Image: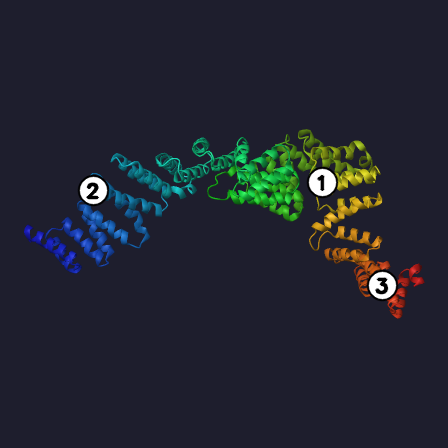
Amino acid sequence: MSNKEVKAALKSARDAIRNKEYKEALKHCKAVLKQEKNNYNAWVFIGLAAAELEQPDQAKGAYKKAIELEPNQLLAWQGLANLYEKSNQTDVKGDLADVYQKLLELYESGDKQKWCDVCNKLVELYHQEKKYLEVAETWQKLIQRKQEEGAEKAELHQLWKKMIQLLKDSTQNQDNKTEQSLLTAFEHAVNSADPVPGEDHQNLYKDFIQCLSKFPHETARLEKACNDMMALYPTVSYPLEVLCLHFIQLEALHCFSRLLEMDASSGPGIIVFGIKCLQEKKYKEAVKSLTEGLQKTSQCPAAWHYLAEAQMKIHKHRDAVLSCNQALEALGTPDSPSLWWKNLILQLKAEALIKIADADAAEEAVKTLEQIVDASSDPVVLAIRGQAYLNKGLMDQASKISQELLLSHPELAESHALEGFIHYSQKNYEQAEKSFLNAIERKAETAEYHQYLGLTYWFMSDETKKDKGKALTQFLKAAKLDSYLGSVFRYLGNYYRDIAGDKSRARGCYKKAFELDGTDEESGTAAVDLSVELGDMDTALSILNEVTEKASTGTAKWAWLHRGLYYLRTNQPSQAVADLQAAVRADPKDSNCWESLGEAYLSRGSYSTALKSFRKASELNPGLVYSIYRAAAVEQILGKYENAIATYQQILKKTEDYVPALKG
């Protein structure tokens, strides 16, 4: 085949492809290759025809052969790009990116539009693969080319905005180069916007500030962006809100008052006010403000942590655990980089669980502490773990941690306190005294240490219990250091009632303890009993009314029982029945409640239900002679004489001289 015939065959192949006669085209190309096996155009045409005949492997091989022959010719690269674009196989995407890169190189000094088209395709491919760094680098080449060509400001602005869209999800990857490219794109977009000020520009600034707030190391850039936006849009509160939320992390409070003046309902402003209250030791106000602020701005882990801290200060430990969980949930988003915050929150959660002081909470505390990074190197965290083991009843593990801490960190109050808690739980009061004194020497401002030293003296001996300089002094110190510590006021009440015989002062302490902790039934009961003894029924009833109003079904038995007995004594049987029924619902196995309910029914004249109640009481407690007697008396009233006689005789068998039964 002469040169002229080769050209004719290639022309026939081209015409066949144009006419979609692909098999015919292949015949012509093969004829050419028999004569010239390295004919570039023949291999390209084979690639084209094979691709159309859905023979991708043959097409790929033909294009690659052509590229091998002429690596800087466009046709084969274009054909290979088309082949890969049509392929459904995911493994060709890497090859396609390489082809696009080569096409960019080949178009560099030629067709500008085609260069831009391929650049767009390559960026889209990288974006699908979440290769954000490659996206950033390629798109910046496109913008640079446009700048060199003298593109209009408006066109460049749109390109920077497009880059923001392409990179907006890259913050999850925490790649510094990509991050800087995204921030650069924002800065160029903000600076090239028109008109300024304007709604689009304002929204772009908001997005820029929101993006900056995700990077804790970009503090200076964030402050500048917020201040620049405030200068342009002085009535918009958003940049101030972001600054407030940011400065919460830095414990800076200088911008909240201005924000609240501008918008009194601003979540971030209310949160920062709550933190200010916390720092000023106004703990209840802190809880109120932080709770309100977080209802408006819930995705702020630092604010949840501060709320938990405030709740711990007023000993709302279960609430603190819930707040810590919210903090961890907010921190768990991909945008949140701070391991330091996570460790801090986990430690606070564990401390709250320890204070709840039951085995389940202790188990959860151990699991929580296991999530803290480098926990084994932190002696305070180790001491908390020791307390968790103690609460679980794992004395050996707790003792082991205590011994290790005393050897490695004898200077720490927590080391001695843990030893004290262990001795106290084992009733080794003399050793506990030494440990708590050592802890107080190192950290005298901790109310809990004084409280436990007071309890140690209380149980050590009658002498130390009665000695004003021992138990009482420590309880008073604890109460002075922590006015929200309800349990210490209960212990003071015990001292004034049982040792000093001062009912009035004791009643005041119990009342205070119950106000601080509404679940403290012992203090509530003691406050009511002492009020009755002091003839102050108004105070007794006000306490009982407050408890029963808040009580849900099946709770607050002590309050329903006390108020029911009061109504019984004051001849108000219907009210007594209602309250004593509530007491029985709270504890259906309490024989005393059933007996009291029987009395209330009897006073009301409901004899059949009274009989059932007395029988139930005696079933629950066969030794309750009075209930058996009252059942017999009711049977007598109802005319069931034989039953009544049998019941009286049953009583007299056990208690021969029980006068009411003899009389009956």
Image coordinates for residue 214, horizontal then vertical, percent: 46, 38
- What residue sits 72% from the left and 36% below the top? 451
**Amino acid at pointer 1:** Gly
Check the image and report above or below for 337 versus 16.
above
Nearest to N terminus: mark 3 or mark 1: 1
Check the image and report above or below for 45 versus 107.
below
Image coordinates for residue 547, horizontal then vertical, percent: 73, 48
Q: Is residue 486 left or right of residue 235?
A: right
* SS assignment at label 3: helix
**Amino acid at pointer 3:** Ala
Check the image and report above or below for 634 versus 378.
below
Nearest to N terminus: mark 2 or mark 3: 2
Q: CA distance from mark 3 to mark 1?
A: 43 Å
**Tag 1 residue:** 486
Looking at this view, is 414 or 187 the one in front? 187
Examine the rendering and report whether any part of residue 244 can be seen.
yes
Quadrant of the drawing holding the N terminus: bottom left
* SS assignment at label 1: helix
Residue 494: quarter of image: top right
Quadrant of the drawing holding the C terminus: bottom right
Nearest to N terminus: mark 1 or mark 2: 2
* SS assignment at label 2: loop
Asked if the residue at tag 1 contacts the one at tag 3, i.e. Cβ–Cβ closer than 8 Å, the answer is no
**Tag 3 residue:** 631
**Amino acid at pointer 2:** Asp
Image coordinates for residue 80, horizontal then vertical, percent: 23, 50
- What residue sits 76% from the left and 44% below the top? 523
- What residue sits 30% from the left and 50% below the top? 92
